Amino acid sequence: MKTSGSAPPSPFIWRRLHSLMGLWIVLFLIEHLLLNSQAALLFGENGSGFVEGVNSIKALPYLPAIEIFLLGVPFLIHGVWGIKYLLTGKFNSFGNSGSTPYLPEYARNLAYTWQRITSWVLVVGIVAHVIHMRFIEYPEQSQKGKEHYYFVRLNLDDGLYTVAARLGAKLYNQQQIQLLKGFPDLSKEPISTGSWHHFLRGIFQKKMHPAPSLSDGEKLVQEQEKAQSEMWLKSLRKRPLGQGQVIAVTQDFGTAELLMVRDTFKMPIMIALYSLLVLAACFHGFNGLWTFLITWGVTLTQASQRVMLKISTGLMVLIAFLGLAAIWGTYWINLKQ
């Protein structure tokens, strides 16, 4: 027989940990969608709030460790235990044969059912989102001297050149990349199409008038510059380009991310999928916030639960609006041209 001083059973501990990780993820969801909304809602500012926010996050020390331990681990714990609950939980709000309880008239039963349905949407959607944004289309990085450059593959549209010009990004098509491959000195600075003849003339002038001999230290610097130029070109050529695609080169990570978000949200299929993901995340997160407060004894009376339900619902609507604004407004309203 267990005494009063015995440790709580492990399922109790894991359920509480699952609940706490859920609260942390809700806080991250608020921050994430608030940041994303600035790509769409800051009209006329070219997504400057989004760019500055992303650059601030990119500049955090030990960012890979932060991503692993403050995001990856909480998502993993919440997700693994969430799947376990999904496999054991039973819906009781949809039609059945009558062999199990069927109580569709109660709002909280419906909420319980939708909490489980949105869980499956999130399991698939978050994995796909991370693969897409963090690995497949994540900007490549290269350094020349003290400058950093970021490379992202984009699909051409009528407004991309004007948007890129305002953001200070340079666009390279397949023909320009092949020319750079033949004349690596051209990669010392990202250049526009109208400047090719100027740089080519410089190449031939150097061949006609060789530079004076260098000291050992100057040779080391030259070798470093050559190696960095080669890495720059390698990053530029790393992703194959299809018909109508270009590589955008920027000097800050936030601008590359903004162009990637713009490119993603001009595709109707992506708009539909990400809208579903945002709606599922907001319902799941803020319904979970309401139940978290009950589980942890913060709202025990019916009156406090009703108040918190209104607050949770209001936050759900607000954060969903911010998320949907980023999806529908980044390209179609704010940065189309």
Image: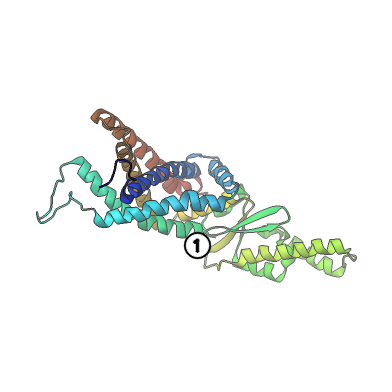
- Taking 177 as reference, is 289 above or below it? above
As helix, strand or loop, the secondary structure at mark 1 comes to helix
In this picture, residue 246 sits left or right of residue 304: right
Give the tally of numbered discs.
1
Q: Is residue 211 visible?
A: yes
Q: Residues within 10 Å of mark 1 (few under 14, many from 20)?
A: few
**Which amino acid type corresponds to the residue marked 1 in the rendered image?**
Ile
Where residue 174 sits in the image (x, y, percent)?
60, 67
Q: Is residue 163 visible?
A: no
Colour mapping used in the image: rainbow
Where residue 202 sits in the image (x, y, percent)?
79, 63
Q: Residue furthest top?
A: 303
Where residue 241 sits in the image (x, y, percent)?
55, 67
Where residue 200 sits in the image (x, y, percent)?
75, 65
Q: Residue furthest left?
A: 98
Please name the residue that numbered disc 1 is placed on: 136
Which residue is at the front of the view, 206 or 300? 300
Q: Residue at x 26, y 48 (%)?
A: 114
Q: Residue at x 39, y 40 (%)?
A: 319
Which residue is at the front of the view, 277 or 25? 25
Q: Residue at x 59, y 67 (%)?
A: 238
Which residue is at the front of the view, 62 or 144? 62
Q: Quadrant of residue 130?
A: bottom left
- Taking 191 as reference, is 27 above or below it? above
